[in-house]
């Protein structure tokens, strides 16, 4: 059982016995490394879900929600980095979200709340990354061998085996080169998919466009809040303190540069994918726009080379995403299993790392194969996980740390964001769980079909 942190003036001395800090969250990075980690954590294949989110909101509300989420998350991450900088200047450098929340809010129970939410987010994304990677392999295989005998769960097993090998990279910092390649891959498949959508939309084979929303008022409301949850999940990361922990101290000011790098990529990828996909497919947009470009019946709606490259780029980036979101789990495991008096690659530490990380990835792979409903997972994770961690807690932590006066603009904008997104999170949780229940009759264990 992990003990909640308490105020400790000798924390920097005692960190020498903290294997999670020394081995997994080693602080050696530069600001651009943090930018690579952030971009991998936020800019992933889930951006291909944005046209699907727009179909529950329509054009103007979709633009409004996308822009609002972008501005609020940038602001929230900036505030959180300032809180982390403030604590570091006070001699309390926090490298874990759970410790930061417990210290600033002065509540031991908040430590366990953040642990629970982070674990749910990281495991959910780990499952989703493996599932989507398996689906990418299935797409390529089906294109080459339409009547081939291999099933989706077999491709998921292949992806899981690769992830078990990659999971042995010892620290978050050791992913910096992989995450730089991940950034390039996100730009690559976005360019390919957007180009394919624009080409299709301007051609004579463009599908009939319908941008109408649900017919019933209740249906419109539920679809809108489900879409808001999806967008929240796409913008969320929930691991900013752990990413900032990889920066070589002093970390003050470095995270802002990393955020600017990340959001430059976000601006290009998010808007172009959302606009082009929804423009072409309207309310027929799938939870993965690649599925629209590769319909089950009839020819593909884009050159097979373009789709093939996009699928390969997505597949490769999913490995990086799975690695990034597994770091918190690895840090928790190694904090309790590793011995800091031994080397990182000593037999004493290498064997437990190999066993525990392999078991964690095997669990994620098993769940991905058993429960293939990626779109629904995305909405639920957004409502229950990302909205509290990324839209509520940063503002609360800032107000508690800097104590702006109740008459100040900062105080009221933070309070407004907390209230609005708490309400949105509750509605999003209800609507996303409702959709999960409605889709339940489509779910089949170890199915080869991924439910939208």
Image (cartoon, rainbow, N blue to C red):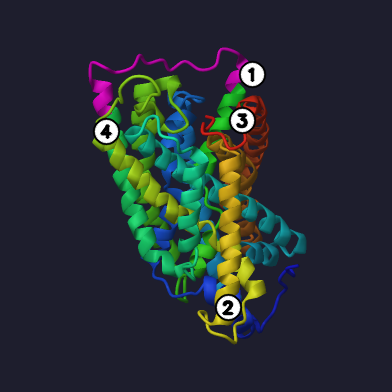
The residue tagged 2 is: 349
Quadrant placement of the N terminus: bottom right
Verify CB contact (< 8 Å) between mark 1 and mark 3. no
The residue tagged 1 is: 218
Q: Give me the C-alpha separation between circle 1 and circle 3.
A: 24 Å
Residue 412 visible: no
Verify CB contact (< 8 Å) between mark 4 and mark 3. no
* Residue beneath the point at 60% across and 77% down: 19
The residue tagged 4 is: 304
Nearest the camera: 179 or 339? 339
Q: Give me the C-alpha separation between circle 2 and circle 3.
A: 40 Å
Nearest the camera: 194 or 134? 134
Left-right relation of 36 to 85: left
Mark nearer the N terminus (1 vs 3): 1
302, above or below 187, in the image: above
* Residue beneath the point at 35% across and 14% down: 208
Where is residue 222 shown, x and y percent of the image? 61, 25
- Magenta highlight range: 198-220
Verify CB contact (< 8 Å) between mark 4 and mark 2. no
Residue 373 visible: yes
Mark nearer the N terminus (1 vs 4): 1
Q: Give me the C-alpha separation between circle 4 and circle 3.
A: 30 Å
How crowded is the residue under tag 1: few (<14 C-alpha within 10 Å), some, or many (20+)? few
The residue tagged 3 is: 443
Mark nearer the N terminus (4 vs 3): 4
Where is residue 64 shown, x and y percent of the image? 46, 32
Disc 4 secondary structure class: helix
Left-right relation of 435 to 4: left
Nearest the camera: 124 or 190? 124
Q: Closer to us: mark 2 or mark 1?
A: 2
* Residue beneath the point at 37% across and 16% down: 209
Nearest the camera: 252 or 405? 252
């Amino acid at each position: 059982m992990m003990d909640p942190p308490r105020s400790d003036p000798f924390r920097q001395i005692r960190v020498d016995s903290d294997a999670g800090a020394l081995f997994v969250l080693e602080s050696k990075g530069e600001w651009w490394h943090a930018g690579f980690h952030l971009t991998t954590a936020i800019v992933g294949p889930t951006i291909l879900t944005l046209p699907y989110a727009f179909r529950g909101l329509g054009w103007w509300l979709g633009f409004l929600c996308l822009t609002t989420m972008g501005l609020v998350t940038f602001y929230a991450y900036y505030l959180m980095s300032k809180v982390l900088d403030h604590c570091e200047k006070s001699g309390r450098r926090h490298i874990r979200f759970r410790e930061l929340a417990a210290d600033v809010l002065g509540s031991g129970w908040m430590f366990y709340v953040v642990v629970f939410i982070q674990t749910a987010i990281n495991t959910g994304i780990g499952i989703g990354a493996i599932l989507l990677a398996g689906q990418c392999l299935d797409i390529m295989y089906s294109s080459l061998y339409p009547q081939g005998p291999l099933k989706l769960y077999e491709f998921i097993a292949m992806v899981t085996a690769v992830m078990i090998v990659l999971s042995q990279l010892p620290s978050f910092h050791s992913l910096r080169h992989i995450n730089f390649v991940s950034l390039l891959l996100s730009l690559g498949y976005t360019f390919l998919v957007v180009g394919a959508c624009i080409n299709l939309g301007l051609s004579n084979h463009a599908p009939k466009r319908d941008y109408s929303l649900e017919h019933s008022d209740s249906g419109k409301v539920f679809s809108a809040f489900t879409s808001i949850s999806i967008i929240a999940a796409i913008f969320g990361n929930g691991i900013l303190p752990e990413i900032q922990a990889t920066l070589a101290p002093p970390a003050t000011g470095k995270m802002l540069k990393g955020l600017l790098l990340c959001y430059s990529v976000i601006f290009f990828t998010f808007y172009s994918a959302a606009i082009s996909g929804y423009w072409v497919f309207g309310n027929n947009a799938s939870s993965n726009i690649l599925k629209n470009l590769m319909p089950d019946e009839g020819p593909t709606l884009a050159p097979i080379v373009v789709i093939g490259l996009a699928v390969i780029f997505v597949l490769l980036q999913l490995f990086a995403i799975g690695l990034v979101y597994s770091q918190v789990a690895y840090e928790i495991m190694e904090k309790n299993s590793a011995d800091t008096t031994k080397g990182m690659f000593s037999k004493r530490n290498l064997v437990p790392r190999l066993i525990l990380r392999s078991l964690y990835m095997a669990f994620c792979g098993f769940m991905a194969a058993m429960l293939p409903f990626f779109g629904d997972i995305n909405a639920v994770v957004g409502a229950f996980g990302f909205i509290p961690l990324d839209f509520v807690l940063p503002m609360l932590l800032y107000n508690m740390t800097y104590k702006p006066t109740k008459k100040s603009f900062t105080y009221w904008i933070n309070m407004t964001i907390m209230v609005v997104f708490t309400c949105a999170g509750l509605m999003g949780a209800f609507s996303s769980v409702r959709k999960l229940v409605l889709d339940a009759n489509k779910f089949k264990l170890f199915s080869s079909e991924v439910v939208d």
